[in-house]
């Protein structure tokens, strides 16, 4: 039966007023992070993916903080509204607060801000079951349904949802539970919510009581029954948050492996943002990817690297324990570059092809042209480094005079010895050599050897002072 209302606009209602007592945290529960983003941001993603007309977030505990956090999210044109629920008198009472902002011609999809892993396909199927005219419930069988609302059926027909605390012993044996997610024509919902009371074990206004009103009014109630518990799992405690984090990360790992990415261990892998990979990428254990990271074809990432906001071109190898964080400026690593182990690339590091950055080398806001190398214990900040430059161990750019940053230019083929201090602003001319231990304060000519340090002196037959008797 194809309902005429199947094209009804979708309005998403997200309940996010609860306190989250068991999190034992000052932060509102729905702002705790999963995969690096607020739980509520994941739920809003669903509204966007379903092309909802609007999303209404019901806030209560920490309302101002939650509203500010949501307003800072990219919403891709989704219309957003808030409704405050103070005090919190139950899920039915929560949805009542949203009614003034819900147009009667729509279908309301009720979600919870603390249930982050519901898949868009699942919600689409639920909306299809609602079809603009029915009450559709997302349900699931649970081996231990303790605490949940039970789906009470008469034959196949759904009769009611009975909350655990109100259920008889017989009803408590029912394993089919209500997930907390429903789709319902708004016009019907409005009428049913007006009839709610709080005559129950918890003295709350239960959203779930709409089922008995639908049955009484002869409106069909349909259950869309799924088997994947993670999709409806809520976060109530740090332990549950960690459990869902692992479930989320495993899904991301599996999706990448399906594309051909070789993960040494999908259970020791974390993406907190967007990771895109070319063919034949290999990622060892214990790596964390944040923000937007792109790995080109054949890139290899060693164990225990943290990489944020960076583009790593084809064939580059990042050895273990490297930290790359491009923040807003980004980091670029060129084709075939070798980075680490123990390297640190900071915002604005732009490395050309075949660049080598070795252990304990820090690069910030610097461009290194193809083939440049800084292999040990060095700092390059605000520098422009030419092709094939070799930058010796222990050398640094003194780029900061205490007030301003200055640039160091190292032209192509310069060889900088060990333990040099390049006092910016300064330019080292192409092909020059800088003797180890030099403190360079003036520009150096191309092709020359420049040494700026105390001359070595030897006094023959030197008698050491002797102790006085
Ligand atoms: C609810 C359902 C139950 C279902 C379970 C699934 C009701 C009466 N019961 O139970 O059938 O099996 O979800 O997890 O709906 N919230 C508010 N304002 C309130 C109360 C709750 O915004 O006054 C929010 C919470 O922050 C949470 C969501 O609504 O995001 C669900 O509330 P929760 O207390 O977890 O639901 P239960 O009563 O456990
Ligand atoms: Mg409750």
Image (cartoon, rainbow, N blue to C red):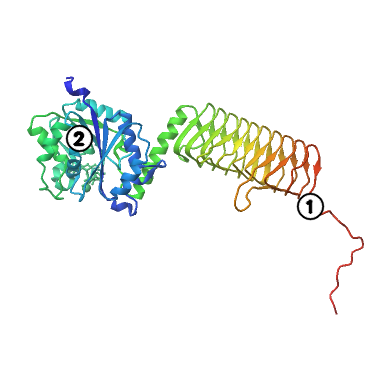
Instruction: Identify the residue at the far right of this view.
Output: 461
Q: In the displayed structure, does residue 170 sit left or right of residue 263? A: left
Q: Quadrant of the C terminus?
A: bottom right
Q: In the displayed structure, does residue 194 sit left or right of residue 331? A: left
- Residue in front for this viewpoint, 358 or 406: 406
The residue drawn where x is 53% and y is 26% is 279
**Picture coordinates of residue 215, whole percent (x, y):** 10, 33
Residue 239 numbered tag: none
Residue neighbourhood size for the residue with mark 1, other residues' Cα within 10 Å, grouped as few (<14), some (14–19), many (≥20): few
Mark 2 or mark 1, earlier in chain: 2
Residue under circle 2? 102
- Residue in front for this viewpoint, 127 or 309: 309
Q: Quadrant of the N terminus?
A: top left
Quarter of the image for residue 157 reads: top left
Q: Is residue 48 visible?
A: yes
**Picture coordinates of residue 449, whole percent (x, y):** 81, 42
Q: Is residue 3 visible?
A: no
Q: In the displayed structure, does residue 114 sit left or right of residue 286? A: left
Disc 2 under 8 Å from ligand 1? The reply is no
Determine the secondary structure under disc 1: loop
Ligand 1's quadrant: top left
Quarter of the image for residue 321 reads: top right
Quarter of the image for residue 214 reads: top left
The residue drawn where x is 18% and y is 40% is 150
**Picture coordinates of residue 127, whole percent (x, y):** 23, 28
Residue under circle 1? 453
Determine the secondary structure under disc 2: loop
Q: How many marks?
A: 2
Q: CA distance from mark 2 to mark 1?
A: 77 Å
The residue drawn where x is 11% and y is 29% is 219
Residue neighbourhood size for the residue with mark 2, other residues' Cα within 10 Å, grouped as few (<14), some (14–19), many (≥20): many
């Amino acid at each position: 039966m194809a309902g005429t209302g199947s094209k009804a606009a979708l309005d998403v209602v997200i309940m996010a007023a609860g306190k989250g007592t068991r999190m034992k945290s000052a932060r509102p529960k729905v702002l705790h992070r999963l995969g690096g983003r607020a739980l509520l941001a994941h739920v809003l993603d669903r509204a966007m993916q379903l092309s909802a007309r609007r999303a209404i977030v019901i806030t209560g505990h920490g309302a101002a903080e939650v509203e500010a956090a949501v307003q800072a999210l990219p919403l891709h044109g989704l219309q957003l509204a808030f409704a405050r629920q103070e005090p919190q008198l139950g899920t039915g009472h929560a949805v009542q607060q949203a009614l003034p902002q819900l147009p009667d011609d729509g279908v309301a999809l009720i979600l919870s801000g603390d249930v982050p892993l519901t898949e868009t396909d699942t919600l689409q199927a639920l909306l299809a079951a609602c079809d603009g005219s029915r009450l559709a419930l997302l349900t699931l069988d649970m081996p231990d349904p303790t605490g949940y609302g039970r789906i009470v059926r008469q034959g196949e027909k759904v009769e009611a949802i009975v909350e655990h605390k109100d259920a008889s012993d017989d009803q408590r044996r029912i394993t089919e539970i209500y997930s907390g997610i429903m789709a319902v024509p708004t016009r019907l919902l409005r009428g049913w919510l007006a009839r709610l009371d709080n005559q129950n074990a918890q003295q709350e206004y239960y959203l779930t009581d709409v089922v008995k009103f639908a049955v009484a009014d002869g409106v069909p109630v349909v259950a869309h029954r799924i088997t994947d518990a993670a999709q409806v799992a809520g976060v109530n405690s740090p332990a549950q948050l960690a459990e869902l984090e692992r479930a989320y990360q495993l899904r991301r790992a599996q999706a990448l492996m399906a594309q051909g990415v070789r993960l040494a261990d999908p259970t020791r892998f974390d993406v907190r943002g967007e990771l895109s990979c070319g063919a034949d990428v290999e990622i060892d254990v214990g790596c964390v990817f944040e923000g937007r990271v792109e790995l080109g074809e054949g890139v290899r990432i060693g164990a225990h690297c943290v990489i944020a906001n960076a583009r790593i071109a084809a064939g580059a190898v990042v050895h273990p324990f490297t930290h790359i964080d491009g923040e807003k400026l980004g980091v670029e690593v060129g084709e075939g570059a070798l980075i680490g182990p123990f390297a640190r690339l900071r915002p604005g590091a732009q490395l050309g092809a075949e660049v080598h950055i070795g252990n304990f080398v820090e690069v910030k806001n610097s461009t290194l042209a193809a083939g440049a190398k800084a292999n040990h214990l060095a700092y390059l900040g605000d520098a422009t480094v030419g092709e094939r430059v070799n930058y010796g161990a222990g050398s640094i750019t003194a780029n900061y005079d205490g007030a301003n940053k200055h640039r160091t230019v190292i032209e192509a083929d310069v060889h900088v010895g060990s333990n040099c201090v390049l006092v910016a602003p300064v330019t080292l001319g192409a092909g020059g050599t800088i003797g180890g231990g030099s403190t360079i304060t003036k520009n150096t000519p191309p092709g020359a050897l420049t040494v700026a340090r105390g001359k070595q002196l030897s006094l023959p037959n030197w008698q050491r002072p002797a102790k006085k008797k």
